[in-house]
Amino acid sequence: MNPYLLRTFVAVARRGSFSTAAHDLGYTQSAVSQQVAALEADLGVALLRRRPVAPTEAGERLLAHAGPILLRLNAARADVRRLSGVPATELRLGATALADTAGSVAALVTTGRAMARVALGVRVAAPARVTTGVASGEFDLGLVDGVAAPGDPLPLPDAGPLTVRTVTEEPVAVALPAAHPLAGRAALRLEALADAIWLDAPDLAPPLDQLRAVARTDGFAGGLRYDGTDARTLLELVAAGAGLALLPARVVRERAGLVGIPVAAPQVVHRTELVHGTLTAPAHTVAAALTS
Amino acid sequence: MNPYLLRTFVAVARRGSFSTAAHDLGYTQSAVSQQVAALEADLGVALLRRRPVAPTEAGERLLAHAGPILLRLNAARADVRRLSGVPATELRLGATALADTAGSVAALVTTGRAMARVALGVRVAAPARVTTGVASGEFDLGLVDGVAAPGDPLPLPDAGPLTVRTVTEEPVAVALPAAHPLAGRAALRLEALADAIWLDAPDLAPPLDQLRAVARTDGFAGGLRYDGTDARTLLELVAAGAGLALLPARVVRERAGLVGIPVAAPQVVHRTELVHGTLTAPAHTVAAALTS
DNA sequence: ACAACTTACGGGGGCCGTAACAATT
DNA sequence: AATTGTTACGGCCCCCGTAAGTTGT
C-alpha cells in the first residue's frame, strides 16, 4: 500500500473532489483518478462513492488509519534526517498555552539565547499539534501540559518513539467566578461537578471526555466551546459565568474575580512535559537545562 | 518513503546480511543492495555499515520507527479488506494465557459452535502478539488480560483504531509458596515487595516494569525469567520458590501449596478485554454474546 | 450542455535481474 | 580464492500526462 496513494486518497476524501485534490497535490485529475482506482484495486474494495464524492464504509475505515500512518512516516523521516543534517543553527519550540505556568518557556528561551548563533522560534499550539509537530520535525522541542493523576504521564497521542520528561507538576483547581455558589468551598469532588456547566476548551484545558474518564461518569456535558489558545480569554469566559474550567491553580489566581477551588478527589495535578525526538546539539543543551 | 524499501531494510538489518535478506524476500542480492541504497539516498543518511552489516545510529532510529509503521500499514489493509471480503466462514480467536480465568474462551467457543458453518480457531499468545494479530487481521477477535487500576483500561500497544470492551475484572493476588514467611499476611502493599525476588514472565503476568510504574519504585529486579504462556509451569516455579508473581487470585488458588495474598495498595485488578477491529458477522455475534 | 470522473494510449522513469566489478576475509 | 556487496546495463512495468470517452446533473 503505497503511501503516495494513501495521501492522494486522503486529499480526495477531504476535499470531496478529485479535481480539487489533483490541483492541491500538483497532479492532473486523471492521475488522481488512476491512483484512487489503483488503491481500490489493491485493496479490493470501493473506497469512494463518486458524484458526489464521499467515502464508503471501507473508505471511512481507511481514513481512520491513514492519518496516523502518514504522520508516523513523516516522523520517521524527520527523525532520521535529523541525525545527519548539517549542525542545527535554529531551535524551534512548540508549546501548549499553559505549559509555561512555571516560566518554562521563558527559561528555555533564556537558555537558548545564551548560545551563540542559534535562531530561536517559539510557537503556541494545541497539545496534539505540538506532539505531532515534534514527531514530524516541525519542532525540535515540545512543551505539553495537561492534567493527570500525580506521577502519571500525560496521555499523549502516539506519534512514534518520542522521549518525554517531566518539567513541572502543580496543583489544579476548578475555576469559578467569585460570586458562584460554590466559591466558598474549601475543596470539591470532581464527581460532584459532573452536572455543572463546563467550558469545553480542548486546546487549553483538559478535554471534557478526559474529565469523564477521570471521574468515571458520563456527565460533564459541554456548554460553550472555545477553540483557541488564549488563556486570558478563557479566564474572561469563566468570570462571565459561561462555565467551569479545570486549570492550574496558579493561572486561576492571575485573574481577579475568580476563585480556584482545589479538587479533593480523584487526585489530579497539572503537569508539563518536555517532548522530543532525536535532539540536535543546541536542543540538547536547552533540554538539559530545563529538566535538571 | 516506500514501505517496500522499509521492509527490505528491516530484513537486512535483522539478518545482518544483504544476501540472506534477499533470499528471504525473494529478491536478488543486487536488488536488495539497490533498495537500501535508494532508501539511504532518499533520506540522505547512511543506514547500514557494511562488512559487517550493522545499522548506523540513523539506521537504529529508523528501525525503531519501521516496525510500528509496517504494522499499522498491515493493520489498515486487513481492516479495510475485512469490509468487503466474502462473508466470513471462519472465526480466529487470539487469547492471552490468563484471559480465560472466568471461562471467557470457553464461552466464546460455545457461542461460536452454535453457529452453523463457521470454522473456529483459537490460539494462545503473548499480549502484544494478540493485539497486533487482531490489528493485522490474523485474528478476528482478541482476548487480552493484564492488570490495571480498577476501571482503567489495559495499557495496550497502539496498533491502530481497535475497539476494546471489558469482559471481566477480578481481584489479583501475590502468589507465594505456603511456606513463605509472608504467607500468613492478610494483605500486602505492593511497594513493600519491591525488594522481593519476582518472576519475570511477561507473557503471563504483568511485566516487571509495569509493576515498577504502578508502585512508583525502581525495584522489582527480575529473578528467573519465564518466556512462554503455560500458567501451570509458572505456578510450579512460584511453588518452587523461584520468585513471586502477581496473578488473578482465582488462578493462584488452583495450585495446592500456593497462597494468594490480596494487594492492599495501590489498588489493582486483573482485567480481561475483548479487542477487535471491524467485525465480520460471526465475530459480531460472538462478541455480543460475550460482553452482554 | 457542462462539469466531473474514467479510460485509452504513449512516453519516461524507476525497479529488478544478469553480469561484471570491487572489497574484505 | 571465496564470499559478499556494488555498479553497469538492459528490459519490463508502473505511473503520469494528454486526450478522448462516459456519466450524472
Image (cartoon, coloured by chain):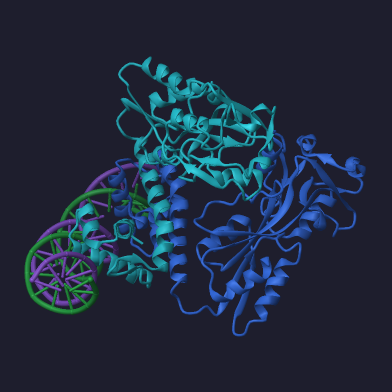
Chain colours: A blue, B cyan, C green, D purple
Which residue corresponds to the image point at 59% horizontal and 28% vertical from the top-left? B179
Q: Position of residue A15 (x, y in %)?
A: 46, 53
Which residue corresponds to the image point at 62% horizontal and 56% vertical from the top-left? A127
Which quadrant holds residue A267? Answer: top right
Question: For the N terminus of chain B, which image quadrant?
Answer: bottom left
Name of the residue lying farthest toward the top: B114
Foreground of the two, A115 or A225 = A115
**Can you say whether A57 is above or below A26 in the image?**
above
In the picture, measured across the screen, residue B70 lies left or right of residue B196, that is left
**Can you say whether A198 is above or below B50 in the image?**
above
Task: Tell how many labels.
Answer: 0
**Can you say whether B190 is above or below C14 in the image?**
above
Which quadrant holds residue A266? Answer: top right
Residue A50 shows in the view: no
Which quadrant holds residue A288? Answer: bottom right
Question: For the C terminus of chain B, which image quadrant?
Answer: top right
**Can you say whether A112 is above or below A181 in the image?**
below
Q: Position of residue B137 (x, y in %)?
A: 36, 38
Residue A159 shows in the view: yes
Which residue corresponds to the image point at 79% horizontal and 45% vertical from the top-left? A244
Q: Position of residue A236 (x, y in %)?
A: 81, 55
Q: Position of residue A197 (x, y in %)?
A: 78, 40
